[in-house]
Amino acid sequence: SRALHAPPHITLQAPFTGNMQKEKLMEAVLNEFASTQKPFPVSLSGFGFFDNRRSKVIYINSKLNRAMDECQQELALFLKNRLDLHEKKTSFGFHAHCTVAFRDLGHSQFHKAWMEFASRKFEADFQAESISLLKNENSSWIPIHGALLAGAE
């Protein structure tokens, strides 16, 4: 149920704590960055999982995508330069995916859920034409600003 508290998305920047007075600055930075990026195709295929001590995650896998990887790397550098985000907050081992389930899955629930998803097929293609700024409010991720990539309609 925790994954239902966020719109479907692929995270390009790990969550970070920011000053609420800088929210408008973050929106302006997002607009500026988006104006430097072109839309790119995204292909989703099948399911995967992370299972570590901190969290258990089941996700829809994104196929390797050079354009998305470059966008994420450029965003990390852009945020470091424009918002002075420290490198450890921008370099988080990018692994493009769409989360299906996380955090509220206990050990036995996780394995039961994974057995269900492991054999499922899922394929989807779309054009990434925008990026969004999400804000965590009461354990829900709310989109507070969106910016179209250059040339998107």
Image (cartoon, rainbow, N blue to C red):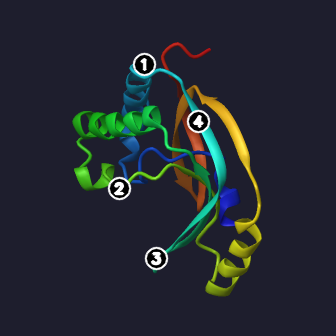
* Image coords of residue 65 (percent x, y): 48, 38
- On residue 42, which mark appears? 4
Q: Crowding near pointer 2: few (<14 within 10 Å), some, many (20+)?
A: few
- On residue 35, which mark appears? 1
Helix, strand or loop at disc 4? Answer: strand
144 shown above or below 135: above
Q: Crowding near pointer 4: few (<14 within 10 Å), some, many (20+)?
A: some
Helix, strand or loop at disc 2? Answer: loop
Separation of residues labelled 1 and 2 (CA atoms): 24 Å
The amino acid marked with disc number 1 is Ser
Q: Is residue 137 left or right of residue 45?
A: left
| Image point (41%, 46%), residue name | 13
The amino acid marked with disc number 2 is Phe
* Image coords of residue 152 (percent x, y): 57, 16
Q: Nearer the viewer, residue 22 or 43?
A: 43
* Image coords of residue 131 (percent x, y): 52, 33
- On residue 92, which mark appears? 2
